[in-house]
Image (cartoon, grey):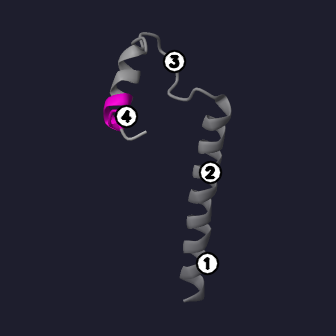
Amino acid sequence: MFRREPLEERIARRQAELPPRTDKRSQFDQPAAKVLLILLATVTVIGHVVGGVLFAFVF
């Protein structure tokens, strides 16, 4: 257990084994991740705008 190579070296070796990305694929491997990111970003922006408007009218 204590004789394993460092994590950085294991990650580098694993990435070296992967084929290079030559196609124009999305950075998201799962479509649901992209939808979730867009949804959460939209909710965050809307929440900040609504909160800012409410804050401006209350104070």
Q: Are marks 3 and 4 in contact (CB under 8 Å)?
A: no
The residue that mark 3 highlights is 25
Of marks 1 and 4, which one's residue comes earlier in the chain? 4
Instruction: Give the foreground label among 1 and 3.
Output: 3
Q: Tag 3: residue type? A: Arg
56 vs 21, left or right, is: right
Q: Residue furthest bottom?
A: 59
Q: How far is mark 1 from mark 3, CA to CA?
A: 41 Å
Q: Nearer the viewer, residue 4 or 20?
A: 4
The amino acid beneath tag 4 is Arg
Q: Are marks 1 and 3 in contact (CB under 8 Å)?
A: no
Q: Which residue is mark 2?
A: 40
Q: Which residue is mark 1?
A: 54
Vertical side of 4 occupied by 47: above or below: below
Task: Please identify the quarter of the rendering in which residue 28 is found.
Answer: top right
Label 3, label 4: how far apart the Cα atoms are? 34 Å
Magenta stretch: give its range: 3-10
